Amino acid sequence: MAQDDLKRSAALAAIDYIRPKLTTRSIVGVGTGSTTNYFIDALADIRHLFDACVSSSEDSTRRLTEHGISVLDLNSVAEVTVYVDGADEVNGARQLIKGGGGALTREKIVAAASDEFVCIVDEGKVVDVLGRYPLPVEVIPMARGLVARAIVELGGAPELREGLTDNGNLILGVHDLAITDPVEMEQRLNNIVGVVCNGLFAAQAAHRVLIASATGVRLLQ
Ligand code: 5RP
C-alpha cells in the first residue's frame, strides 16, 4: 500500500475516533502536514458536528477555511476537545518527533491546550528509539550560532533549514542526537537560550496514536 493511502487511512480512523466525542460546542485542534491534510478534508464532511477549529499553522488555517470550517484564535476558546496531528517519528511510549513541516511550536501549544491529543501516522513512522529523523529546533534568528554551538556540545549535528516559520524564526534540523531519554533531551534543548521550542513531544506525549498499515489501523494507547 502506498504511503499516501496509509496516511489517508490513519486520518479517516481519526474521524471515526473523534466523532462520538463531538458536540455542537466542541472545538477541534488541527495539526499540520500531509497526513493532517487528509484529516482536514474528511473533517469537512462532519463540520455540522462541532463548532470550530483552532489551527497550528497558516497552511492548515487556509485549508480549513477553504472547506468553510471556521478557525478561531486559541486565546478565544476555553477548551479544545481533541487535537489531531501527524508526526515524523513515534515510539512505543507515544513520544514523538514533530516539526517536519516547521510548525512544531504552534503544534505543541495547541496540543498542550487540548483535552486529548490523537496522533495519526503510517507505520513507517514507528521507531524503537527516536532520533533517526533530524530533530527540528525552532530558534530566534539572532541566536542561530549560539544555539548551534550548544547543540554540538550535546552531541548533535545541526543543519540550518531553508525558510522561516510562521513565527518568523529559523529551524535547525539536528542529526545524530542520542535520544535515550526523550524527556530529558526535550528539557535540555528547551533550556538553551534562543531556542523557542523543539520537536520532541515527550514530556507531554500523545494520548493515542492511530497507526495505519496494510493490514488496518491499530490504536496505541
Ligand atoms: C509538521 C509536523 C507534521 O505532523 C509531520 O512533519 C508529519 O508530516 P506528514 O504528515 O506530512 O508526514 O510535525 O510540523
Image (spheres, grey):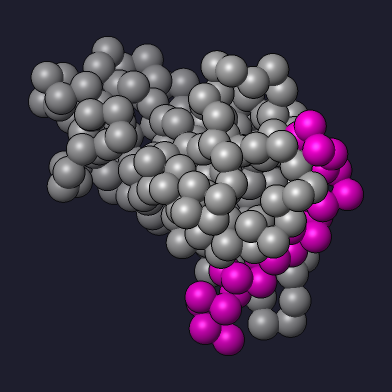
Q: Is residue 220 magenta?
A: no
Quick check: can you spot residue 135?
A: no
Left or right: residue 81 versus residue 183 is right
Residue 196 at what x, y percent from top left? 34, 22
At x 20%, y 38%, the residue is: 164
Quick check: can you spot residue 134?
A: yes
Residue 145 at what x, y percent from top left? 11, 25
Depicted 115 relative to depicted 64: above or below: above
Left or right: residue 210 versus residue 31 is right
What is the total number of numbered labels drawn onto the structure image? Answer: 0
Residue sticking out furthest to the bottom? 1
Corner quadrant of residue 138: top left
Left or right: residue 65 versus residue 15 is left
Residue 197 at what x, y percent from top left? 38, 26
At x 51%, y 75%, the residue is: 4
Left or right: residue 17 versus residue 6 is right
Residue 215 at what x, y percent from top left? 74, 81
Q: For the N terminus, which image quadrant?
A: bottom right
Residue sticking out furthest to the right? 20
Residue range corresponding to the magenta coloring? 1-26
At x 61%, y 26%, the residue is: 112
At x 57%, y 69%, the residue is: 7
